[in-house]
Structures are given as structure tokens and as C-alpha cells.
Image (cartoon, helix red, strand yellow):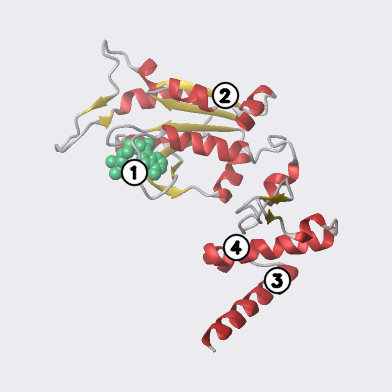
Amino acid sequence: MRFDIITIFPEIFSEVFDFGIVRRAVETALIQINVHDLRDFTFDRHRQVDDRPFGGGAGMVMKPEPLFRAVEAVIGDESDANVLLLSPQGRLFDQATAAKYAKEQRLLLICGRYEGIDERVVENLITEEISIGNYVLSGGEIPAMVVVDAITRLIPGALGCEQSAERESFSNGLLDYPQYTRPADYRGKSVPEVLISGNHAEIERWRRRKAIEKTLRRRPELIRDRILSESEQRELESVLKNIDEAETNKGT
Ligand code: SAH
């Protein structure tokens, strides 16, 4: 997978991508990240990338010419390239979108700044606008880091242990189960007995149950949107029954 990022602040990325899973993915050539300075695609003395908005109003808008030139230079004649714009107006980025893009060979990410970018760029060059959440940031660089990180972890071989990605929150439509590590007893707080029982079937069941309980409590809409397997359905019913009983007991 090759990521290309177009930005006016290329230096921002070096440190962030130089750690952990992303760094290892670069070192093992699973991914390649090329960061391009938008100002290299300007021709004027001031290397200007922004200008005042037509029609007036506050702030500056990113000019079309440097962005057109940059995108054309980076994708060449690849007409089916994925050109993503980070934008608060885009579709909300989630694990399913990350998984979809993890199957691609190339992604070009464009980071906006100021009040955003000239709409002609959006209409003519962008294949999808992606938002990382319902809030406005000052630039697309942090969102681009989020997107590259989330996608990279899903590329086969990026995580040490292949199972980890499958089991994580959202991957199977549920939040992750609670995790514990040594010591088994810390300041009088002990880890759930079942996890040190060595009974793998019981551990599996406990984890399934905890994942369902947690998801139901915190993100019930995830459960609504998902088809449960038979064993998960059984667990869900039993969790719901327990909640019911607890409610009834409270009432009496
Ligand atoms: N005036 C614009 C916001 C500009 S914010 C509007 O109201 O839509 C400047 C840049 O930050 C955007 O061009 C985009 O690249 C980036 N950005 C801000 N918030 C974002 C978000 N939630 N997700 C992705 N990118 C975002």
C-alpha cells in the first residue's frame, strides 16, 4: 500500500509515523508513505497556496492551481486512483471504511487548512471526503494521521499477531472485552477468576459475554446494527435477562 499525503506542513508527519506499528510497516515495506509539500506545486515567488474567498467573508481558501498540479503530479495517469479529502463535511470515518481502504494499492490524502479548499478541487479531483468526527479541526493533517494509522493496522502482517485486528473493538461489530495482565492481584484488586482457570472454552464464553455487556451498556446502537451469531444471541438474551432481574429487584 502506498500513501501519498499533500499538505502545507509536511514536517508534522515525520515524528508521528516514526513509531510503533506504522514505523514497522514502513520498515518491512508493507506500506510506503510519501509526504508532498503543496508549496512545491506553486510557481509564484511567495509560494502562495491560499487566497481571499470570492464573495467576501472571513479567512482564506486554498487555491485550486497548486492542488490540481500536486494531484496530477502524484497520481500521474492513474484515472481510478483514490483521492481522499479530509473534511468535516465528509462521511464519518469508521472501522468498515478503514477495512475497505486497507484492500487498496494506493491512497492519496489531501489535507485542507484555513477555511477549506476551492470547491472545484472537491468536484473534480476528490473521490471521497472523509471526516474523522463531528468537530472542526484547524487542518487535515491530524485526520490524515488517523486514517493512515487505522488503515495500516488492518493490512495483513502489520500487527505482530494476526488475530489482534480481528478481535478488536468494532472489527466484529462489538467493543473489545476487558483485558488484564499480571499481577493477578494488585492492591487487593484481583483479576476475574475465570481468566486464570486455564479453561479456554469458559474464557471464550466470558469474553463474549463481557463484550456484549459492555457494548450494550455503552454503544447499544452497535448491537442493533449487527447480526449476532447464535452463541452471541444466547449471551445477549442472558445479559438482558440479568438486567431485567436487577431492575425488578431494585423495584421491590
Ligand atoms: N470551513 C470548513 C472547515 C475548515 S477546517 C467547514 O466548515 O467545513 C480546515 C481543514 O481542516 C479542512 O479543510 C479539513 O481538511 C480539516 N478538518 C477539519 N475538521 C476535520 C474533521 N472533522 N475531519 C477531517 N478533516 C477535518
Q: CA distance from mark 4 to mark 2?
A: 33 Å
| Residue at disc 1, CB closer than 8 Å to ligand 1 | yes
Q: In the rendering, which numbered label is found on residue 136? A: 1
Q: Where is residue 243 drawn, in percent x and y?
A: 60, 77
The residue sitting at 74% across, 46% down in the picture is: 163
Mark 4 near mark 2, Cβ–Cβ under 8 Å? no
Task: Please state which of residues 2 and 163 is positioned toward the viewer in this rendering.
Answer: 163
Comes first in the chain, label 3 or label 1:
1
Q: Secondary structure at mark 2?
A: loop
Which amino acid does the dot numbered 2 rest on? Asp
Mark 4 is surrounded, within 10 Å at the Cα level, by few (under 14), some (14 to 19) or many (20 or more) other residues, namely: some
The label nearer to you, 4 versus 2, is 4
Comes first in the chain, label 2 or label 3:
2
Locate residue 107 relative to residue 117 in the image: left or right: right
Which amino acid does the dot numbered 4 rest on? Lys
The residue sitting at 31% across, 34% down in the picture is: 117
For the question of whether residue 249 can be seen, the reply is yes
Task: Please state which of residues 72 and 20 is positioned toward the viewer in this rendering.
Answer: 20
Position of the C terminus, as image quadrant, is bottom right
Mark 2 is surrounded, within 10 Å at the Cα level, by few (under 14), some (14 to 19) or many (20 or more) other residues, namely: few
Comes first in the chain, label 1 or label 4:
1
Q: CA distance from mark 1 to mark 4?
A: 29 Å
